[in-house]
Image (cartoon, rainbow, N blue to C red):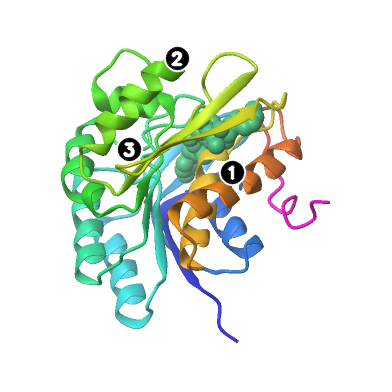
């Protein structure tokens, strides 16, 4: 028996809700084999990020070399990328090893407000990694920051944003509307030809830590299993919706999702 192999390149979350931990749980639940290259260790819990300790650039390169020289991965997902030199290195491996299923979650900060990828790294992300992506999955805050806009507050602003972000060379963009105000929201997928709306009713749930990481990882698992981008996003939306519905409390702040909810859905 063999399983599709999915690699996450991201930061560790000691609280277990986001980052590498959310990614590996998602891969496992979707019957794929998860591998990890860790960019940074965050001291983090449900209340926020207390400290960030990047792995050295040598440490990052050693992990990339070990994985890529031995294992043919079917898809890669990236999360917290720390800084421009890390992104340069990761882009080189993605290009040299012909990774053709790449999901970039352009994590710039945590919802609690800590910087996880340096602002100066945005240009490197745009120029070297973005054009290699099958799909990039910004939230509204990340999209506005990368476009140099003050904010994105409406579906028509989301539509303008998704078209502009697509011009940077990724095959498709999934602009997530989780931060849109109101009880109804939408994620927009644009593949250069078709704009697809994934509408959702907001689940009234305080425990949503790790939604972005989980969604991007589920898309990567779907792609690794041979699904189209549209089908992978559609499955990933169902996965994250089930997981949000069963989010739970483990500390004083915003708790994690239940990653096994999709497997046990009725
Ligand atoms: N309260 C919610 N109810 C239903 N879906 C949600 C909720 N919050 C986020 N989502 C969905 O979870 C995914 C992650 O969205 P978002 O919160 O915008 O990203 P991030 O975690 O990167 O900030 C998106 O598909 C979004 O639509
Ligand atoms: C190590 C690490 N990586 C990414 C994030 C951001 O995760 P995300 O899924 O966007 O979840 P929230 O920050 O919205 O809870 C993180 N916090 N830590």
Q: Is mark 1 within 8 Å of ligand 1?
A: yes
Q: Nearer the viewer, residue 19 or 265?
A: 265
Within-10-Å neighbours for mark 1: few <14, some 14–19, many 20+: many
What residue did someone put label 2 on? Answer: 154
Q: Position of residue 264 (x, y in %)?
A: 80, 55
Number of disc labels: 3
Q: Quadrant of ligand 1?
A: top right
Tag 3 near tag 1, CB within 8 Å: no
Going by the picture, which residue comes out furthest to the front?
Answer: 193
The residue range painted magenta reads: 258-266
Measuring 66% from the left and 40% from the top, which residue is drawn there? 241
Quote the CA–CA distance across marks 1 and 2.
Answer: 20 Å
Residue 13: tell me if it is visible.
no
Measuring 22% from the left and 49% from the top, which residue is drawn there? 131
What residue did someone put label 3 on? Answer: 117
What residue did someone put label 1 on? Answer: 237
Decide whether residue 199 is among the magenta residues: no
Query: Going from the N terminus, do you reach mark 3 or mark 1 first?
Result: 3
Considering only vertical position in the picture, is 241 above or below 179?
below
Which type of secondary structure does the marked residue at label 1 adopt?
helix
Which type of secondary structure does the marked residue at label 3 adopt?
loop
């Amino acid at each position: 028996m063999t399983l599709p192999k999915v690699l996450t390149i991201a930061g560790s979350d000691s609280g277990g809700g986001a980052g590498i931990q959310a990614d590996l749980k998602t891969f496992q639940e979707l019957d794929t084999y998860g591998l990890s290259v860790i960019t940074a260790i965050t001291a983090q819990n449900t209340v926020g990020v207390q400290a960030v300790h990047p792995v050295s650039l040598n440490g990052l390169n050693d992990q990339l070399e070990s994985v890529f020289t031995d294992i043919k991965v079917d898809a890669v997902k990236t999360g917290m990328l720390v800084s421009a030199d890390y992104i340069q290195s990761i882009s080189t491996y993605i290009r040299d090893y012909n990774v053709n299923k790449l999901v970039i979650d352009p994590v710039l900060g945590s919802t609690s407000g800590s910087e996880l990828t340096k602002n100066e790294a945005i240009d490197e992300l745009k120029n070297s990694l973005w054009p290699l992506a099958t799909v990039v999955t910004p939230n509204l805050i990340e999209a506005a920051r990368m476009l140099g806009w003050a904010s994105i507050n409406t579906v028509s602003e989301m539509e303008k944003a998704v078209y502009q972000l697509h011009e940077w060379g990724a095959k498709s963009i999934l602009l997530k509307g989780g931060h849109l105000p109101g009880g109804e929201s939408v994620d927009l997928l644009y593949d250069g030809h078709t704009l697809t709306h994934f509408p959702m009713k907001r689940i009234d749930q305080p425990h949503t830590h790790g939604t972005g990481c989980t969604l991007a990882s589920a898309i990567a698992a779907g792609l690794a299993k041979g699904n189209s981008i549209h089908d992978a996003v559609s499955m990933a939306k169902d996965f994250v919706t089930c997981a949000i519905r069963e989010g739970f409390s483990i500390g004083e702040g915003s708790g994690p999702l239940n990653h096994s909810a999709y497997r046990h859905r009725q």
